[in-house]
Amino acid sequence: MKVDLIIENGVVLTMDPSRSIIENGVVVIDKGKIIDLGDSAILSKYESTEKINAHEKLVMPGLINTHTHTGNTIYRGIADDLPLKDWLEKFIFPLEAKFCNKELVILSAKLSIIEMIKAGTTTFSDMYYFENEVAQVAKEIGIRAELAETLLDFPSPTVKTSDEGLKYTEDLICNWKNDPLIKIAVAPHAPYTCNASTLKKAKTLADKYNVSFHLHLSETENEFNESLKKNNATPVEYLSRLGVLEGNVFAIHCVHLSENDREILRKNKIGVSYNAQSNMKLASGIAPVADLLRRNILVGIGTDGAASNNTLNLFEEMDMGSKLQKVFTKDSTVLNAKTVVEMATLNGARLLGLENNCGSIEKGKNADIILIDLNLPHLIPIYNFYSHLVFAMNGSEVNTVIVNGKVLMQNRKLKTIDEEAVLREAKVLSLKIKNNF
Ligand SMILES: [Zn+2]
């Protein structure tokens, strides 16, 4: 049988239900999908003009970043060492008011996607402005994405009111329906930037089209305490009372959670995006992720924006996220390496409703696959692949990235976008921002 692409001679870390690892493995890809996998014995059944030799490489599902703001990568490092409130109100919101436009978002999204691909990310969930443009960029480069226009009760760079934001989102949902790579979600920014009416309308919109709904939730102690004062309820209780914490929903951060909050998340099957480094850097606190996992709450990993992280690197996030929980719980057994890799692949896919598309290398799924160089001094010896992925790698080992069967990067060279040109343009734009803010 003739097929589009064959990956051979690699170690295949499948992340399938039995977590099989195939030595000298083969993955067969046709029309964007994984149609077969196994050891070298299956090679005789297929032929292809496109072959990738994965000798001394790990072949695994691409990583899934469950929370980004790709449009703010252009502000990376412009305002560090600040609490969230000052960072947001004195820098990010004013910067966005002054500089954010379609061209900036397009360039920043390109820069972000290049960074993500180079560190093995094949799917990201974005919440920013001009998301129609982000969708076009993602599609052009060929990465998988779940995209949501940030809804706010005050004017955003894209729209003037929350109702206009909802209309913009509805148009996005309709325009990108059935796209093989792009999914649209509904994303109110947070309970403190969207009133009850906006939150409810947003949820109604998400339910109407059966798309994901997500928002920042219980990120800081201040947000938690203000909600108690204003709503006589924690942020989670408040949203639950509004009826928006049901169905296809995930919450980003969840750093400050009462016992009752955790039970609400568990009972309502609300997933959580864990953004350890952003929470550490803004001193927001530590999300009780080990406890959430113990309660069988679905937790994926996100980087948050590069303006608060300051990278979009899931290898760093896996490493930090695991160690932070160990320190927090004083229990070195929590968030073990295998669990963390599951969080960055399978859990991320489930959180975004993409579990039938990606998150593992299995027959019938889309071919979202990365190849990682293993023949490197900091990765030798190899006793346990999960351990290396979380505690030894930094993302620079990612050699090849495939999304939906298409090779986006090979031997660290990007094939669908001119990396040098984007870096050059981003440097020019950053100078303009620096000189005018
Ligand atoms: Zn965020």
Image (cartoon, rainbow, N blue to C red):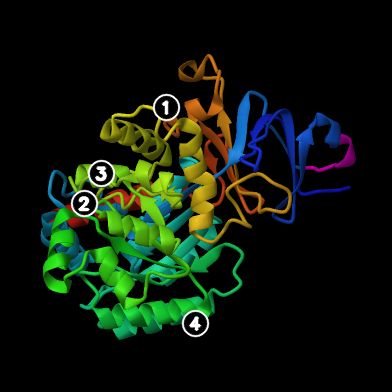
Image quadrant holding the C terminus, namely bottom left
Residue at 60% x, 38% y is 60
Position of residue 10 measured from the top left corner of the image (x, y, whole percent): 68, 29
Q: Callout 4: helix, strand or loop?
A: helix
Q: Mark 1 belongs to which amino acid?
A: Phe
Image side of residue 266 versus residue 48, left or right? left
Task: Report if residue 211 is visible in the image.
Answer: yes
Distance from label 1 to label 4 (Cα)? 42 Å
Q: Mark 3 belongs to which amino acid?
A: Ile
Q: Which mark is residue 391?
A: 1
Magenta-drawn segment? 43-49
Which is nearer the N-term, disc 4 or disc 3? 4
Question: Label 4, on which residue?
Answer: 208
Distance from label 3 to label 2 (Cα)? 35 Å
Query: Badge 4: few (under 14), some or many (20 or more) residues near its Cα, within 10 Å?
Result: few
Position of residue 296 measured from the top left corner of the image (x, y, whole percent): 46, 49
Which is nearer the N-term, disc 2 or disc 1? 1
Question: Label 3, on which residue?
Answer: 286
Distance from label 2 to label 1 (Cα)? 36 Å
Which is nearer the N-term, disc 1 or disc 4? 4
